[in-house]
Amino acid sequence: MTLVRFISADGTRVVEAEAQPGERLLEIAQMHDQPLEGVCEGQMACSTCHVIVAERHAALLPRPSVEEEDMLDFAYGVSRHSRLACQLYAAADLPELEVRMPAGAVNMQSR
Ligand code: FES
């Protein structure tokens, strides 16, 4: 089980969720009313699932693919630990994952 903690963009709201191994962060976020549209449903074509992973957890995740990094180049407010929630999964060896919502989103599919 992974304890996922979603922090709002301004840091004032925290929502916690329990996720089973294999569950995708995008769906976990949407089930808990987080503002991640996920317009392309995980095809790495929109960047509306952009999240900022807590520094202490960033190195515990599999490295992003080239395609994920390319899409992150277009995300709003991208930072060093930015990831696409459609590419992240809960895992048995990942007890905790904290992510912050970005202050905005860019939908590359509408450009
Ligand atoms: Fe579109 Fe993740 S849902 S890039």
Image (cartoon, rainbow, N blue to C red):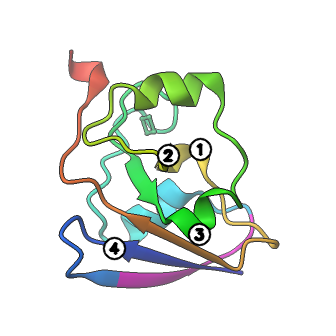
Kindly identify the residue that appears in the image at 31 percent across and 60 percent down.
Answer: 101
Q: Position of residue 53 (x, y in %)?
A: 49, 59
Q: Is residue 67 above or below residue 79?
A: above
Residue 7 numbered tag: 4
Residue 56 numbered tag: 3
Closer to the camera: disc 2 or disc 3?
3
Q: Amino acid at mark 1?
A: Gln
Callout 4 crowding tier (Cα within 10 Å): few <14, some 14–19, many ≥20: many
Residue 83 numbered tag: 2
Residue 87 numbered tag: 1
Image quadrant for the N terminus? bottom right
Residue 88 falls left or right of residue 61: left
Using the rendered view, name the quadrant where residue 107 is placed.
Answer: top left
Q: In terms of secondary structure, where does tag 4 sit? A: strand
Q: Earlier in the sequence, mark 3 or mark 4?
A: 4
Q: Amino acid at mark 4?
A: Ile
Q: Amino acid at mark 2?
A: Arg
Residue 47 numbered tag: none
Q: Earlier in the sequence, mark 2 or mark 3?
A: 3
